[in-house]
Every structure is written in C-alpha cells, then in structure tokens.
Amino acid sequence: SQQGEEDPQALSIQEGENATMNCSYKTSINNLQWYRQNSGRGLVHLILIRSNEREKHSGRLRVTLDTSKKSSSLLITASRAADTASYFCATDDNDMRFGAGTRLTVKP
Amino acid sequence: EAEVAQSPRYKITEKSQAVAFWCDPISGHATLYWYRQILGQGPELLVQFQDESVVDDSQLPKDRFSAERLKGVDSTLKIQPAELGDSAMYLCASRSTSGRAELFFGEGSRLTVL
C-alpha cells in the first residue's frame, strides 16, 4: 500500500518557470523525503525534511511540510529541461512508502 | 561513490517460469528494501530487511514471491511461478542505520512476463 499521494499527476511547463508539486499523507512520520526518477532508472534522493521542520532549501529546491495538514510541497525554481523526470514523496515512519508521483516535463 | 548493484538489468520470461533478482547493497548498510514499480506508478514496498531479518513483508505475495538475505549482505528476490501481472521494475534500495536517513537505489531489474 502507498502512503503519499502526489498532486498533480502530470505537470508540463516551459524552461525557466517554477514547478510546484504537492504530497499528502495519512499517518504520523519521522521525516518526509523527495526523490527523483529519470525514465527507466532508479530513484535518487533529493531532499529530506524532518517532522519538526517547516521549510528547507537545497539549491533550486524548496520543500515545505505542514504536519497538521499532513502535506508537503516541493518547489523547483527556474526549471531546466534536465529537470524532466518523475518526482516522488516518501514518508518515513521506520518503513519507507512512496506516492504515485508527479511526472514533470520541462520544455526547452 | 558506492552504489547499489542489481542484476539482471532486464529479464524476459514466459508465465509459469521462475525468475530471480539479485541485489548487493552499499557496504555497511544494514537495511535493505525491495520495491515493485508498475509502469506509471510509484514504488510499492514488497519487503524490508534489517540485517538478515525480515522487518516487513506484509505486501509480499507469499504464494509466489520469496526474499532472502542469508548473511545480511546481498539479497535475492524470487518469483515462482511468474504471472503476466508481475511485469514491472523491481527496485532494490539500502539505507544506513546510522546518521543519514536517505535511501540509495539500484538501477532496477525490468521484468517482462509473456
């Protein structure tokens, strides 16, 4: 069974625009993580936010967490064609469960 | 940089045949996960190991799937007999139990059942 649910399922933007993806989850968590997956490849960790944190930045990535609403968002600023991939949130409560993902397409 | 190794990268088999996937996690990573990912969906946890012990296999279809990690290092996931609906990417991931909480994934094994 999956824990997180991403929204939207698919997102298409122009290079240079910002991309925002949302994740909702159901149970309590230790932390929430975001991963990226290029087509046909394994997942790569992007960023982790702990349950006592509200916002975190890493380069062009900004993640927020609202534990009262059980939701998180991932913002990618100044997107590039190379950001085209699927993005997944994963909730960590000792096991790691992933959502269905957002398929991001960045057009050059 | 250390990586999670998986093999085979691709496997085509006929239904009712047996298939096996192998995973070698990053050295020293005590926690190992097997996920199944159907095309267009997110990874679904099949089994989690802590060293050689199964921590969670609640989503593993035990009538046909088995997983082992005998010495607490590398792991094998087996399907017997394979069914058409088993066509998917099988992903292995590992995690250190000290410090960083991120998962490191292998490149996956793509299974096609004909």
Image (spheres, coloured by chain):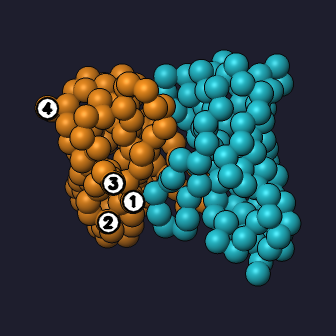
Chain colours: A cyan, B orange
Total labels drawn: 4
Residue B3 appears anywhere in the view: yes
Q: Residues within 10 Å of mark 2 (few under 14, many from 20)?
A: some
Q: Amino acid at mark 1?
A: Glu
Label 3: state its secondary structure.
loop
Quarter where residue B96 is shown: top left
* Pointer 1 with pointer 4, Cβ within 8 A: no
Residue on which the image places disc 1: B107
Residue at horizontal 41%, vertical 49%? B105
Q: Quadrant of the C terminus of chain A?
A: bottom right
Report the disc number at residue B54. Answer: none
Query: Taking B32 as reference, is A88 left or right?
Result: right
Q: Are marks 1 and 4 on the same chain?
A: yes
Instruction: State which tag comes first along the sequence, 1 or 2.
Output: 2
Label 4: state its secondary structure.
loop
For this rendering, which residue is in front, A99 or A64? A64
Report the disc number at residue B9. Answer: 2
Instruction: State which tag comes first along the sequence, 4 or 2.
Output: 2
Q: CA distance from mark 3 to mark 4?
A: 24 Å
Q: Amino acid at mark 4?
A: Lys
Quarter where residue B94 is shown: top left
Label 2: state its secondary structure.
loop
Instruction: State which tag comes first along the sequence, 3 or 2.
Output: 3
Residue on which the image places disc 3: B1
Please provide percent x and percent y for residue A91: 61, 31
Residue on which the image places disc 4: B71
Q: Amino acid at mark 2?
A: Arg
Q: Residues within 10 Å of mark 3 (few under 14, many from 20)?
A: few
Residue A2 appears anywhere in the view: no
The chain letter for the residue carrying disc 1 is: B
